Amino acid sequence: MAEVELRDVEDGDLDALFEMMRDPESVRMAAFTSKDPNDRTAFDAHVARLRSSPELTFLAITRDGEFAGTVGSFEMEGDTEVTYWVGRAFWGQGIAGQALALLLQIVPTRPIHARAASDNAGSLRVLEKAGFVITGTDTGYANARGAEIEETILRLS
């Protein structure tokens, strides 16, 4: 089995992360993305804010030392939420699940929440395997799809 680890996001990760976060299939699956995934200036500013904020966790995921994506947690409306982005080349290998498990060891806050597009079966499976339970749905505007879509809300107690 591949070794998945978390570490700080490094400058050398940014080009790969930008490419991952503008991959059309990945963007469609994530749904709730930046307005223009191809805007490198906006991406750099966003990542700089994430890397410098003491209020959130933003870590690189590596598989056997290779950068595979990011995982993190942040606060929204008083709730702590998890988020992750794994490059499409790494899908279906258990990397997101392993990274999420490692993050949950680092971030002790409970309950902790997550959201995913309701048709993103892979992400919902990762969250449910980690112990998250569906608590409801919501509708929101998904930039990647140019429409309102259903989002599943989950919680880990």
Image (spheres, rainbow, N blue to C red):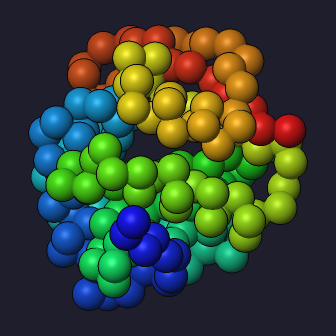
Q: Quadrant of the N terminus?
A: bottom left
Q: Is residue 146 above or below residue 106?
A: above
Q: Residue at x 51, y 39 (%)?
A: 126
Name the image quarter holding residue 76. Answer: top right
Name the image quarter holding residue 28. Answer: top left
Q: Quadrant of the C terminus?
A: top right
Q: Residue 13's spot in the image, x, y percent?
A: 28, 79
Most extreme residue toward the front is 1
Q: Residue 65's spot in the image, x, y percent?
A: 33, 83
Q: Residue 27's spot in the image, x, y percent?
A: 24, 39
Q: Is residue 24 above or below residue 44?
A: above
Q: Residue at x 14, y 47 (%)?
A: 23
Q: Residue 81's spot in the image, x, y percent?
A: 67, 46
Query: Taking 97 as reference, is 21 left or right?
Result: left
Q: How many numbered marks does the figure carry?
A: 0
Query: Taking 23 as reference, is 91 left or right?
Result: right
Q: Residue at x 41, y 51 (%)?
A: 94
Q: Residue at x 28, y 47 (%)?
A: 91
* Residue 41 visible somewhere in the drawing: no
* Residue 129 visible somewhere in the drawing: yes
Q: Is residue 157 above or below residue 152?
A: below
Q: Is residue 112 above or below residue 120?
A: below
Q: Nearer the viewer, residue 154 or 21?
A: 154
